[in-house]
Amino acid sequence: MVLPRKAIISITSAQAKLFNGTETTGLFISEALHPYNVLSAAGFEVDLVSESGTYIADWLSQQPDFLNGDDLKTWNDKNSDFRKKLDNMPKAADVDGSQYGVFYASAGHAALIDYPKARNLQKIAEQVWANGGVVASVCHGPAIFANILDTATGEPIIKGKRITGFTTEAEYTMKIMDDLRSWKSEMVEELATRLGAKYERSAGIWDDFHVVDGRLVTGQNPASAKSTTEAVVEVFGEL
């Protein structure tokens, strides 16, 4: 079948406190904005969606080290295409996954909370995968793979495949592992092991690094969002 040149970026609906309740985590802005920009520039029609149709922005993703220049201008402009789509997202249950050739899971630490059980988001990804499209994630986005199945085999789509995502080392470096454990959340590396995937990473926890395994494309951290999406466009072009 001819895949639609349309992409959908999933957004976490969850929020939680980190650092002894002093900061709020939610969507890591650049992990959705950079994919949006790359896909749009490549001629894709791009939509955003979350399980509940809502989101909150992660505090860290709004700091100057992560949000500056044109990204900051886009974020601050509530009439930008990105902000209008983000601020008016549909619920995942109201989205038809067959309309898309790419599913991309953006993240933020909060994704560890809602993605594993975000069944309607997962159904969109399953439909894209079943139709021969590209499924991708960045940073904590692989949390959504907890229950995404290959409907042809009944197995997890990442089983036997190479993936990357935010490292457990980085969680400890940020000194937030106790917070994450209090959420009863599974780390990306743990998820990969449990579902039979091969987890790979760069030597540096903040390096720009991504992995391509067929139609599955994954990025390690916020710095990898752009290159991961460029790889998605390349893979899509070869389908």
Image (cartoon, rainbow, N blue to C red):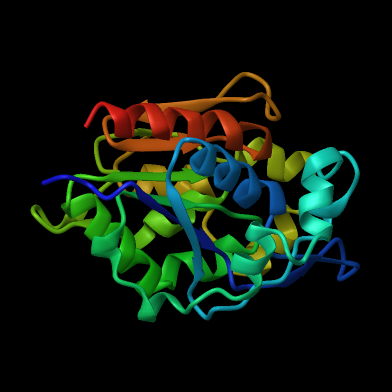
Regarding residue 13, the answer to whether it shows in the image is yes
Residue ranking furthest to the top? 203
For the question of whether residue 200 can be seen, the reply is no
**Identity of the residue drawn at 62% across and 73% down:** 14
The quarter of the picture where residue 192 lies is top left
Residue 207 image offset from top left, x and y in percent: 67, 24
* Left or right placement of residue 226 versus residue 189 in this view: right
In the foreground, 129 or 110 = 129
- Across and down, in percent, residue 217 comes to 40, 36
Please give left or right for residue 10 compared with residue 177 in the image.
Answer: left
Which residue is nearer to you in this view: 69 or 49?
69
| Residue drawn at point x = 38 percent, y = 59 percent | 146
Q: Residue at x 69, y 54 (%)?
A: 28
Q: Position of residue 161 (x, y in %)?
A: 29, 34
- Residue at 73%, 43% (x, y): give it: 172
Eyeballing the image, is 57 above or below 44? below
